Image: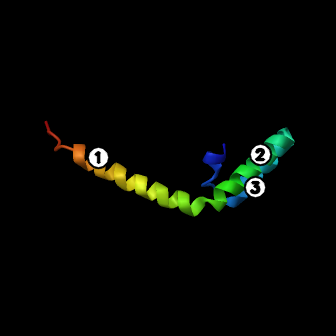
């Protein structure tokens, strides 16, 4: 769930933490801690994701071929 919420708006993150805490205080606490850790490492993760994206584009271009229209 942390992964799914890590890119969400902070207002949404706080609301989900509140809802999860109402269901199970431990769950809400773990979610809040996970989001906090994700936020502190966000810059490094962004750079890693950009690198992976560039690799994916290169791989797609390497295996691409022209379409054969009807």
User: From the viewer's perspective, is 11 left or right of 42?
Assistant: right
- Depth check, mark 2 against mark 1: the one in front is 2
Quarter of the image for residue 9 reads bottom right
The quarter of the rendered structure image containing the N terminus is top right
Q: Secondary structure at mark 1?
A: helix
Cα distance between the residues tagged 2 and 3: 13 Å
Depth check, front residue: 66 or 57: 57
Crowding around mark 2 (Cα neighbors within 10 Å: few <14, some 14 to 19, many 20+) is some
Q: Nearer the viewer, residue 35 or 22?
A: 35
Q: Is residue 12 visible?
A: no
Mark positioned earlier in the residue sequence (2 or 1): 2
Residue 15 visible to an observer of this rendering = yes
Residue at (56, 63) in percent of width and height: 43
Q: Position of residue 46 (x, y in %)?
A: 52, 59
| Image x and y of residue 45, in percent | 54, 57
Image check: 48 left or right of 9?
left
Is residue 34 shown left or right of residue 45?
A: right
Secondary structure category for the residue under label 3:
helix
Any mark on residue 30, and which?
2
Sequence-wise, the earlier of marks 2 and 3 is: 3
Above or below, 23 against 57 in this view is above
Q: Nearer the viewer, mark 3 or mark 1?
A: 1
Say whether disc 3 or disc 1 marks the residue closer to the N-terminus. 3
Please tell me how crowded label 1 is: few (under 14), some (14-19), or many (20+) other residues with Cα within 10 Å.
few
Distance of label 3 from label 1 (alpha carbons): 38 Å
Q: Above or below — where is 42 with respect to 33?
A: below
Q: Which mark is residue 14?
A: 3
Examine the rendered structure and indicate whether residue 24 appears above or below residue 31. Answer: above
In the rendered image, which residue does mark 1 sit on?
A: 60
Residue sitting at x 32%, y 52%:
57
Task: Report the number of discs.
Answer: 3
- Report x, y in % for residue 66: 16, 44
């Amino acid at each position: 769930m942390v992964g799914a919420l890590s890119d969400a708006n902070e207002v949404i993150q706080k609301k989900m933490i509140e809802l999860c805490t109402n269901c199970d205080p431990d769950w809400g606490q773990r979610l809040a801690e996970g989001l906090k850790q994700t936020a502190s490492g966000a810059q490094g993760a962004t750079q890693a994701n950009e690198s992976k994206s560039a690799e994916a584009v290169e791989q797609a271009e390497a295996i691409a071929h022209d379409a054969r229209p009807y």
